[in-house]
Amino acid sequence: MKNIYPFRAIGRYFICLLLILSVTCSLSAQNKKAPEKKPAFYSGTYRNLFREAGYSQSDINKKVETAYHDVFEGPNRVYFEVGDSMAYVSDLKNHDARTEGLSYGMMIAVQLNKKDVFDRIWRWSKKYLQHQDGPREAYFAWSINPQTLKKNSEGSASDGELYYITDLLLASNRWGNKTGINYYHEARRILDAMWKKDGTGNIYNLINTEHKQITFVPEGDNYNWTDPSYHLPAFYEIWVLYAKDGHEAFYKDCADTSRAFLHRACDSVTGLNTDGTEFSGQPHTAGRRMAQAFRYDSWRVPMNIAMDYNWFGKDKSWQEDYAKRFQNFLRSKGIDTFPDQFNTDGSRPEFILPAGGVRKLRHSLGLVATSAAVSLANKEKNTFDFVRALWNAKLEPYDDGYFDPYYDGLLYLFSLMHLSGKYQVIKP
């Protein structure tokens, strides 16, 4: 009997050792993080938040198709064909066509593989808005009356050119350059001309070359400040990849500079920015009262940040924090009632910028849309409240009769595309 005890002791030792190993492996498994998902450009997988929220793919496809029909084809459309080969997009309430909407229309068309629509808008833009000579050569007049074809301004709004260039590069990747339009050549024409703008005739580069930030207008004093909603680091990444004009290092710096700029421009609590800022991120106050609060232009900022996060993921930590702060602020104002203009601290602005001639705050579809798009960067589960709010929203007149199928409609369609995984980097 005396010889049994050593074996029992050894048995107890091995049992304890197995228990320790089991607990250690269990804790190791718990602490082991799931592998970080690669950004969509690298993985080729674009998240479909509507699917994640429980909607069927057929309903999602129908939602995007219906929105496209409403904006481009329905009775309240903003897209109008001209003759056999041209078309324009009109801001109906302002009775003009502007490079903003025209270039947005082209981006929607290339993303949804609607070549005829893309080509028609480009031909119209090139014929009626692009300067063919002089100091502004290859730039675009930002606004025109589509009925009289009289330009409301000869000058450019820098975001229009930013979109046109990116649209054309993606079109080159999607359709090639031998199908009627040499998209790459047209993109390079704008870029190459941009680099020749040295202040002659008071016309400059679209990007302030000292600060490596996009300008509000590449002309006169407007070359020296910016609009946060024009900051699209994801587009510069496209230029790095596909422009092939020898300025890749500069465009990469611009992308990184825009990301750093947005840290400064967006309030650390609310996430809100002003419509216009200095390159420092501080509000631009020189003679533009409308630019000194979060208003219509600013609605685009959360969507732009979400795009950069989703596509390239180079500023993930800050962008995730921004998305959470921004949505939490709007939630505090009522997810179904938050207004559309704020001071950056979240208070009501003294000056309300009118829309459609009416000076009032609304729960605007455009902001409902882009505040849902930023859910792509928010890891909290309650972010799907914004996704569902967009799903349930409608492109229709407000209770007061005001209706904006142009700006509300385009941002609505953009955001549906982002959240359904239909807005992508188109590779060659």
Image: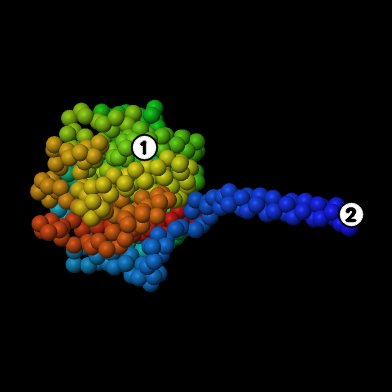
Which residue is under mark 1?
262
How many C-alpha atoms fall within 10 Å of the one at disc 1: few (<14), some, or many (≥20)? many
x then y, percent, for residue 123: 31, 55
**Left or right side of 101 for 357:** left
> What distance separates the C-alpha of mark 2 from that of mark 1?
78 Å
Residue at position x 47%, y 46% in the image: 313
Residue at position x 18%, y 62% in the image: 396
Q: Which of 333 and 23 lies nearest the eye of the viewer?
A: 23
- Disc 2 vs disc 1: Cβ atoms closer than 8 Å? no
Name the image colouring: rainbow
Q: Give the mark count.
A: 2
Residue at position x 39%, y 37% in the image: 258
Mark closest to the chain's N terminus, 2 or 1: 2
x then y, percent, for residue 232: 38, 43
Which residue is under mark 2?
2
Give above or below for 91 relative to 353: below
Give above or below for 1 relative to 240: below
Q: Amino acid at mark 1?
A: Leu
SS for tag 2?
A: loop
